[in-house]
Image (cartoon, helix red, strand yellow):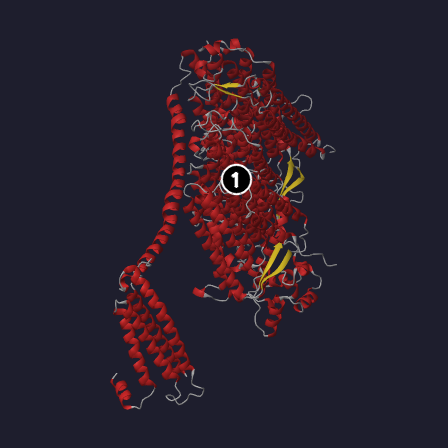
Amino acid sequence: MTPLVASLLTSPIGVGHYLVVGAFLFTAGAVCMATKRNLLGVLMGVELVLTGANINFVAIGSPYLSENAVDLGLDGQLMALFVIVLAAAEAAVALAIALNFYNTIGSVDVDQASQLRG
Amino acid sequence: MEGAPLIPTLLLVAWLAPLAAFVAAAVVPSVELRRRRRVSASTAKAVAQVATGCCLLSLGLAITAMVAWFARDGSTSLAAPLVGRWFGFIEVASLSLAAEYCVDTLTVLMATVVTTVAACVHVYSLGYFDEELAEGGVQDHEATPGETPLVREGRLHRYYQHLSLFLFSMLGLVVAGNLAMTFVFWELVGVSSYLLIGYYYERDAAGTAAGKAMLVNRIADAGLLLGMIALWNATGTLAYYTPDGGGLFDGAGLLRDGSASEYLLLLWAGLGLFCGCIGKSAQAPLWSWLPDAMQGPTPVSALVHSATMVAAGVFLLGRVYPLLLPEVLVVIASVGAVTLLLGAVLALGTTDFKRVLAFSTISQLGYMVLAVGLGGWVAGLMHLVTHAAFKALLFLTAGSVMHATHTGDLAKLGGLRRTMPRTALLAGIGVLAIVGAGLPIVGIGLSGFYSKDLIFEQAIAFGRENSWAGWLSWTPTIGAVLTAFYMGRLWLLAFAGEPRSEGARAAHESPASMLAPMYALGLLAILVAWPLPLVGGSLQAALEQGDLAAHKPTPGAVWQEVTIPDHHAHHAEGIKTQAGLTAFGAMLLGLLLAAAGYRFGGLLHPIGSAAIGGFDRHTMPALNRATAWATRATGGLLAGTVDRLSIDGGLTALTRALYHGGKSLHRIETGGLRHYVVLLVLGVVILGSLAINAASQLGVAE
Amino acid sequence: MTPETPPLTLLPTLVALPALAAIALSTPLSPAWSRRLTLGVMLLTAAIAWSLVGVDLDHGVRLWRAAWIPSLGAEALLGLDGLNLPLVLLTASLCPLALIASGSVTNRVRTYCALLLLLESGTLAVFLAMDFVLFYVAWELLLVPMYLLIAVWGGAERMAAAVRFFVYTLAGGLLLLAGGLIAYSYSDLTTLSAPQLAASGVLGPVAVASDDPTAALEAWTESADPGAQRFTRAEASAEPARTFNLLALVASAEQTDALSGVGPFGKSAEWWLFALLLGGMAIKLPAVPLHTWLPRAHVEAPTGVSMLLAGVLLKLGGYALVRIAWPLCPTAACELAWLVAGLGGVSIVWGALAALAQDDMKRLVAYSSVSHMGYVLLGLAAGAGATGSGASAGWDADTWRIGASGAVFQMVAHGVTSAGLFYCVGLLYERCGHRDLRRLGGLFNPMPLASGMAVVLLIASLGAPGLCGFVGELLTLLAAWDAHPVAVTLAAIGTILTAAYILRATRLAYFGPVYRGDDTAQLTPLRPAELFVLTPLVLAAVTLGVRPQPLLDTIDKPLTASAESLAARTGEPPLVAAVLSPPGSSTEPPTDAADAR
């Protein structure tokens, strides 16, 4: 563990650093989803996870960060754009669900959302 | 010789005529039943007449065939059998089962015996069953004892239908030229016997007796079936003889002279065949169905259960005699000896007219089986012929008595010689014939005298060859004493003395249609073994023409102390006189005992009869019931416990385990969003690490 | 001269007609008209089936073919030979009788009729299918109507019985599917010679008996047939061309010994294939210990459905064994013959003992089916390693032929008697409202004809000569003795027990002074429709018993071919040469087997 951290701290900024940030955001999002009982908090966690994934996409796809990128190098950015669009759509749908949920249950506590359980 | 090719054709027609009657009797009344809801008396009568006509036709053809057979060759040497094929039945690959005939002395004699008795019974039944044709149905007092009698419609047509089926099957059995055909008709006589015993199917006793007869026969037939299968697999043929010498008997000869295992196979096959005989001829230990079979109509008892079908076992032994090894013959003789004593003893313990006759049949069949087992082919089969005549006669007299008095209980009979003199006379002839009345040194007597003497001679001859087998040569003598005693007892109780019930007092002589066949059989019971005055032949001489017994003494290979005497052994010095005197003495002793019992009382229940009757009426049925119960309980165990609990239960348990497994997995589906997220992340992490691991390993490999 | 073998378009008609009628029943027809339409179609189907008797089957199988799923290599291939002709006739004849026997069905008659029609169509398709995929699909399709027929129109515990039937049969079907896929993955059309390709119908129906198979092969490879294109592609790239054609599968198994290589657990692929097929069919047959679905299904099913279930559906298992399992895996079959015979012998005794213990007459007849189908297994095991001297452990062609003929005969005979007996039980149930033997009795006098016919059928089932049960039993026992004496002895004991339960049923149900049940029973004589059902069955029982040879002749030709192939593939090497020679020279029956003894 220590050599990895040391090499990250000593080397110039590269893909690895971005991946660390992405992983951090992903983990934070996942933990947020798993621990928050507030539906809006869960939604924020989802957004965080998506952002973490976006950073990874951009970092790996960037021609500035990897030497052997020979193509146009827009794949990652493209995927990131898709993810952003999807995240927006998902947020719209999720907020609608949240509003409905609040109207029926009278709260935004996700633990109460278990009527569909078999 | 020109008669020879005709004989099979004659027998074919004689065989198929009853089949035609059967088909007609099955179809015509059924159609009428459908149309008019009942079968009219005139149809029933027509069916009866057609069946009788067919039977008489068969009789005529059989007699013609017999005359043609004995006339075809003047010499008395062993004549070669006529064999051939009528039509095919099953042909697959090397297996060929066909309706084949094998005509020899045994065939023509047996065919004549069967058709003669059958003709008498057909005619007799026309008179005996007059109540079946009564207007307004038949009253059956025995079906519902203690209640109002059951009224049913007459069904004479069905009686004659089954009788025709029986005659067809019996003749098929007689003319059969291969073991498979024998087996087929062996089973068919069993089926027709089942139907005939079950004629009064409203009576529970009759239904049970019918089923018992069939079942016991089936037990024995399993042995016959296995024996037949083993023989076919060992020899590749089932025909007794073939013109080119490739038949079963030649095949068996090869097996006998072959290796030890082949000899053993023939031994087992022979025992299997004899097993069939044990069932059909009611030998120990499978005798108990025959007394019960007396629940059938009495004419049926006369034809099926005394004269012909039960004798088919002995006929089978006579037919397959060359297949039987000395060891098997000794087993046969022992079973026969046990049976003849058993039957004679059991006859003492019952007071039912027909049941006494049934036990006497068992005992006489024991005589025949014993004789064949001792190597006395001629003796055994001659007794078969004479027994058919006098036992059929005795049963018909029993029918006559029961027709007149409506009871067969000896305790309620008595004094019938005054009200039914002709029946009494004929019964007397029958009794004298069965006890073997005759003058020993002079050599004149009733038919039973000749055949019984021959059996005694054979027993003595066998005893001379085999010093260890003393008991086999003495049992006939003990049996003869007992026979004379119980037959004398029967006649004295039924016909002598004073009537012991109202029914016996009001008895009347039977009509002519019943008496005529009885007279015919009475004549035969006296004459059948007499030498023919003009032709110069006799029953014994005729049988000796077809004797299948060995020409030289045959020792056993596995059990070497056994030696079956050759077929001339009983002509040896002094045997005839010894046998004649022994038989005469035994008969006299038995008759004297019976007369003494009559004079001093106690004839109805002789000493020990209670124990014997108890064995017959309580111990044996209890044994049978216990066997049946045990078998059914096993079935119940299999169907209930094993099928339902183990196999089905196993499946149910499996289903339940799957269900509960699903249920327990169900618990992780909490419905809580946060749990799902955790699981999701865990899944991603595990899958991702697996993927990275695999990718890095690939990288290492490259 | 090339014998004419044009495509037999009657075969698809036979399969499609009932199915189309079932679709037609989706229109709102009244119950009476549904019955009439169904009966008409079923009678028409029966008439078409009986017209097949005149088809010339001397030159091999008669086929009809259409493209179906080319990407899988599966075709709609229907074929007719002596083996399935009797079973097709049995099916087509029993279906109308079963419909008439369903007179007491009053709810949802239209659906009932449609399901019966689907059942008929599926059964005929199974019997006629010469392509494994078609065979399997039809096999599974059968399940649905049968399941519904039991589950909707059955007795009190119908759901449990129907589910059990479904699960058992589905399991059997899956084993069959696994077996079929194994066979498929080992098949290779390119190893077959032109005559073999022609004879197994790969080249089309017309070429089956062609004089010049090579020319037919060339014509086929140049045709647009998707199978032909696959074949040429495979040949060009030296890859195997797989096939689902049942006849070609067998021919391919004859040609290559790929199946006999060592597979899992040290057993050959052939051994596994055979074990799978045997397991699947033992469920359907059914053999002890996989029989427990049968009594339940029968007890719950309505009369007409019981008739079809016992009369026809049980034959599918035996048919699949003769058609697929034995020809595909002779060596494994020989190796496992002891197991097959043992299953047969145990089934005979077990079924008979269980039948003896029953008081429900329908359950008794159901268990008797288990007992009787045991003879099928016993007959098929006949002749294994039975050459006596121990020189060869292979099949004895002659003995197997006898045993297998007996087995097929037994299937047909049991189809007749069991259908008849279930109908007789149904008659009693309709009149008395129960089937408890202890409360029946005395039926002979009020119902003389029905009882007389029932007794004939019972005695036929008992195996008395002159009626149809005897022939199959005798043939199988005769043939099986040499190889399996213990199983035959068991079967002989089984004949005693059979007599015991049959006679018991006869005595309790029909004999006796009076009916022992309550007074509400209507012991009326047979109605004309009922007579119409019972009479053909009784006549068939008598006819088959008196004159078995026509049926035996019909089934003999395909069985002879199978027997020779079995013997050649498991026997000594020189025998293999015989099967490779042209078909004409090897059709002589091996007469020396009997003489050699």
Asked whether residue B437 is in view, the answer is no
Give residue C168's position: percent from left, percent from top. Answer: 44, 52
- Is residue B621 in view? yes
User: Residue C252 or B432: which is nearer the viewer?
Assistant: C252
Which residue type does callout 1 highlight? Ser
Q: From the viewer's perspective, is B350 left or right of B572?
A: left
Q: Secondary structure at mark 1?
A: loop
Figure quadrant of the N terminus of chain C: bottom right
Dot 1: chain letter: C
Q: Residues within 10 Å of mark 1 (few under 14, many from 20)?
A: many
Res. B61 image quadrant = top right
- Left or right, residue B612 beside residue A27: right
Q: Is residue C36 above or below residue B488?
A: below
Viewer-proximal residue among C142 and C514: C142
Q: Identify the residue shown where x is 44% and y is 65%.
A: C264
Query: Residue at (59%, 15%) from the top-left corner?
Result: B515
Picture quadrant where residue B146 is located: top left
Relative to B618, C325 lies left or right: right
Please name whichever residue, B189 or C511, is drawn nearer the observer in this view of the structure.
C511
Instruction: Please state if B200 lies on the left or on the right of B672 as rendered.
Output: right
Residue B531 image position (x, y, % from top left): 63, 23
**Residue B570 on image: x %, y %:** 55, 30
Q: Is residue C359 above or below residue B680?
A: above
Q: Where is residue C104? Give x, y as percent.
A: 50, 37
At 30% from the left and 82% from the top, the residue drawn is A20
Residue C254 occupies which quadrant of the picture? Answer: bottom right
**Count the marks: how many?**
1
Q: Which residue is mark 1?
A: C102
